Amino acid sequence: MRTLIGLFALLIIFAPAANAAEEIAVTIKDHKFSPDEIHVPAKKAVTLKVTNADPTPEEFESHDFDVEKVIAGGQSAIIRLQPLDAGPYRFYGEYHEDTAQGVLVAE
Amino acid sequence: MLGALVIVFREVVEAGLVVGIVLAATRGITGRSWWVSLGILCGVLGASIVAVFAGAISNAFAGSGQELLNATVLIIAVVSLTWHNVWMAEHGRQLAADMRKVGTEVSEGQKPLAILAVVVFVAVMREGSEVVLFLYGIVVGGTDMGSLLAGGVLGLAAGAALSALSYYGLVALPLRYIFSVTGFLLTLLAAGMAAQAVHFLQLAGVINVFQSRLWDTSWLLSDSSILGRMLHVLIGYDDRPTELQVIAYATTLAIILLLIRMARSERQPRTAS
């Protein structure tokens, strides 16, 4: 039974995804986020475009909204967020956790 | 320096636990050091390549390259682990018996060694690329390099020590249990990796179903804590899994156990013991 559910899940998994999410730009400079407070609509899929303006790599990470993504120096990365419940969500740069701190507020 | 130590330690432990289980699971099979070393070596090489091309990988597939790469290598590891467990169900008893009889290494089991080397390769490559990138950042950044590098080296040593401890804990088990215990651990490892692969596919936007969180135990054990991370690697612990992650976990577990049962009943229709 569980196998059947799994197979069924696999089938819908690969159905093409329609993504018309709002895109929000964030920049990392001198190991700090700007803006370091992002407001997004709750219960809606959002896309973050994180640009790393530093020459060093950074790992954009959030335990609260469960994202982990390495961004090389001078590169940007697309991060897709699942619809979030209203509330604050912390994110940080794992490689420079003492300065790279930010919060995303779903409302 | 402490930051560098913690980051390197975390990644090394995550890869090291996998290496430890694989080493324990292949105890007494000729040539296992060679295969595992090969896996580690290729993993470090792969990690460096992934790190060098991090930008290109990230930008591939409409910005989902990193997630898709992670999901792909995880799925390869899951398939390898499944294959290994089924092979062991067919041959494990014979292998253990031979080992006890001869009291020394046996040369059967080269196939599972090659397969497990792939698993080691994947684990080292995934965790290693983060270490390489982090260390690269230190070198480029240039600030306070000595102390950061010292932290990195200490983290590497501490991570290796903890992994070695897990290995010696496992091989202290009596030989007759070792294959069943490590087989069980490898099965949970596979289920956890399947759940992680699904998570990456969800992040990549490939999957958009069953993505609500099934439970939240972050108050009890956060998977960003060291213990949480270790359990995450070992049994796939997740403090806030999505529905699909749990489905993937349960399905992988069910499939492996089913295949093992089928392999066993084929091999030994009825045993007296």
Image (tube, coloured by chain):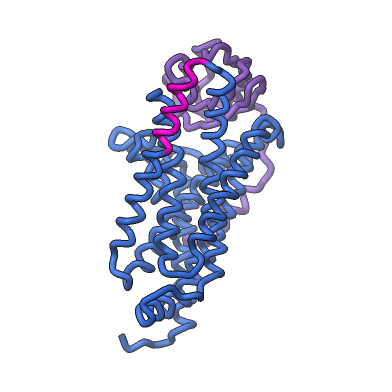
Chain colours: A purple, B blue
Work out which quarter of the rendered image holds the C terminus of chain B and state it: bottom left
What secondary structure predominates along the stretch shown in magenta? helix
Tell me: B45 left or right of B2: right
Nearer to the camera, B142 or A103:
B142
Residue B78 visible = yes
Work out which quarter of the rendered image holds the N terminus of chain B and state it: top left
Q: Does the magenta stretch include residue B266?
A: no
| Res. A72 image quadrant | top right
At x 58%, y 12%, the residue is A29
Tell me: B217 left or right of B125: left
At x 46%, y 69%, the residue is B29
Q: Position of residue A78 (x, y in %)?
A: 63, 27
Examine the rendered structure and indicate whether residue A39 appears above or below residue B208. Answer: above
Examine the rendered structure and indicate whether residue B126 appears above or below residue A58. Answer: below
At x 32%, y 70%, the residue is B175
Nearer to the camera, B191 or B171:
B171
Residue A92 visible = no
At x 46%, y 22%, the residue is B146
Nearer to the camera, B179 or B85:
B179
Q: Where is residue B115 in the image (x, y as percent from the top left)?
A: 56, 62
Tell me: B2 left or right of B196: left
Label tally? 0
Q: Is residue B147 magenta?
A: yes
Examine the rendered structure and indicate whether residue A85 appears above or below residue B184. Answer: above
Q: What stretch is highlighted in magenta?
A: B143-156
Q: Position of residue A12 (x, y in %)?
A: 61, 49
Q: Residue furthest front?
A: B146
Q: Where is residue B16 in the image (x, y as percent from the top left)?
A: 43, 47
